[in-house]
Amino acid sequence: MQRIIVIGTTGSGKTTLARAIAMRLGLPHGEQDAWNHLADWQEAPLAGFRAAVDAFTAQPGWVMDGNYGKARDIGWARADTLIWLDYPGQVVFWRVLTRTVKRVVGRQELWNGNRETWQGVLQPDAPLRWIFKTHWRRRLETPVLAAEYPNLTVIRLRAPGEAERWLQNLSPETESARPLRPE
């Protein structure tokens, strides 16, 4: 595991897990949201976004999080491991709800000066609505998409506790990490 992509529904904890993996393995971390969301929530031009993914994944080792299909052909083709946070809908919804409230109340800066606001919480592409558009679709699509990339070892983690146990067993000396069997 040297080139790792962490995917999952909005709010599943992709960035948190990816940062922890990167720290454990001593690899750089890249967050696709930071490359996609320019100032004032403007979407990055496609060419610029793809260039950022291309440059980051050209390194010999890395951990990147994000579900963006518009650069999947770059990142997934170069990765050796796909970690899929496939948590139940109610778990992810609760995480999105609490995270959104904390971000709005705390005026937390996300990427490039952007902050979530009460006004923006119910926008069509806001996380609280986005989860309903994507969660169940991703659950169906991800195995099909992953099968198109035989270079990937897929690690499907189905609960936060399973992800925590998997991470605890991960070390730089590990030749390859395998998920624990679900209980």
Image (cartoon, helix red, strand yellow):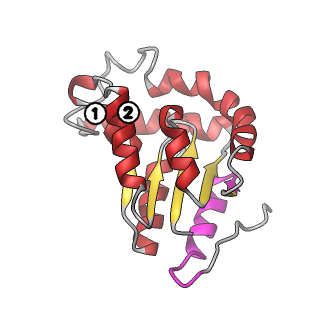
For the N terminus, the quadrant is bottom right
Please state which of residues 59 and 110 is positioned toward the viewer in this rendering.
59
- Per the image, is 133 magenta? no
Please state which of residues 177 and 164 is positioned toward the viewer in this rendering.
177
Please state which of residues 183 and 14 is positioned toward the viewer in this rendering.
14
> Left or right: where does residue 99 sit relative to residue 84?
left
Circles 2, 1 touching at the beta carbon (< 8 Å)? yes
> Left or right: where does residue 88 sit relative to residue 99?
right
Q: Is residue 147 visible?
A: yes
> Left or right: where does residue 95 sit relative to residue 137?
left
Percent of width and height locating residue 78: 53, 55
Measured along the vertical axis of the image, is residue 53 above or below residue 127? below
Percent of width and height locating residue 120: 34, 18
Q: What is the count of numbered marks?
A: 2
Does dot 2 land on a helix, a strand or a loop?
helix
- Which residue in the protein does label 1 denote? 105
Q: Which residue ends up furthest to the bottom in the rendered image?
A: 173
- Per the image, is 171 magenta? yes
Q: Which numbered dot is residue 179?
A: none
Q: Residues within 10 Å of mark 2 (few under 14, many from 20)?
A: some
Percent of width and height locating residue 41: 28, 24
Disc 2 to disc 1, C-alpha distance: 6 Å
Per the rendered image, the range of residues in magenta is 155-174
Does dot 1 land on a helix, a strand or a loop?
helix
Q: Is residue 102 visible?
A: no
Q: Which numbered dot is residue 101?
A: 2
The disc labelled 2 sits on which kind of residue?
Answer: Val
